[in-house]
Amino acid sequence: QVQLVESGGGLVQPGGSLRLSCATSGIVFSIYDMAWYRQAPGKQRELVATRGRGAFTSYADSVKGRFTIFRDNAKNTAYLQMNSLKPEDTAVYYCNARRPGSSANDYWGQGTQVTVSS
C-alpha cells in the first residue's frame, strides 16, 4: 500500500521558516518525481515546487528564492524548506509522487497546514 505522510506544518510568524517532510512507503521512491502543492481557502490547488528523479527542480514564481525542494532517496523522503515566509504562503501543503509516463502511479499525501501570521 502506498503512503505519503506529510509533517512539519504549523504556525509561524512572517519572516520565519518551516521545513516540511513527506515520508513515503510502498513505492520505489528513486524513480518518482516529487512535488509540493498548496491550496489556500477559496483557491485552487497550485504547484509550488518539483524535484525530478535527477537534479531537475522548478518553482512557482511566488516562492523562488525562498523555498527549496530536496529529496533523500536513502530515506524515501522529500522535503520543502520554506524561508522568509509570508502571510500569503498560508495554505494546506500537499506532497505528490508521480512516476514519469504513468498516470496511474500518481499519489498524494493528506496535507499539512501552514499558517503564517503574527
Image (tube, rainbow, N blue to C red):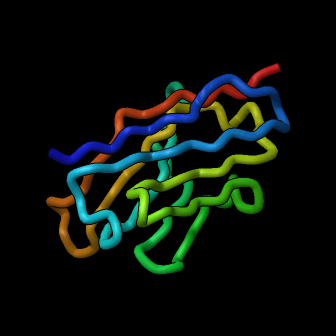
Residue 8: x %, y % from top left = 57, 35
Determine the residue located farthest toward the top in the rendered image. 118
- Above or below 25: residue 51: below
Instruction: Tell me the quarter of the picture where residue 104 sits.
Output: bottom left
Image height of 23 relative to 71, above or below? above
Residue 50 position in % (x across, y down): 50, 63
In this orientation, which residue lies closer to the viewer: 20 or 58? Answer: 20
Residue 40 drawn at (x, y percent): 54, 32
Quarter of the picture containing the N terminus is top left
Q: Position of residue 113 (x, y in %)?
A: 54, 27
| Identity of the residue furthest to the front in this view | 74
Tell me if 6 is positioned left or right of 1 in this view. right
Measured along the vertical axis of the image, is residue 55 above or below residue 116? below
On the image, which quarter does residue 77 sit in?
bottom left
Q: Is residue 43 visible?
A: no
Q: Quadrant of the C terminus?
A: top right
The residue drawn where x is 48% and y is 51% is: 36
**Left or right of 88 in this view: 73:** left
Question: What residue is shown at x 42% (from left), y 34% (from top)?
Answer: 111
Residue at x 68% of width, y 23% of height:
11
Residue nearest the viewer, comparing 42 with 30: 30
Label total for image: 0
Above or below, 44 relative to 62: above
- Looking at the image, residue 71 sits to the left or right of residue 105; the answer is right
Residue 106 image-quadrant placement: bottom left
Residue 97 seen from this side: yes
Answer left or right for 55 relative to 65.
left
Instruction: Please report the residue visible at 34 percent of the width from the left and 50 percent of the height from the top.
Output: 24
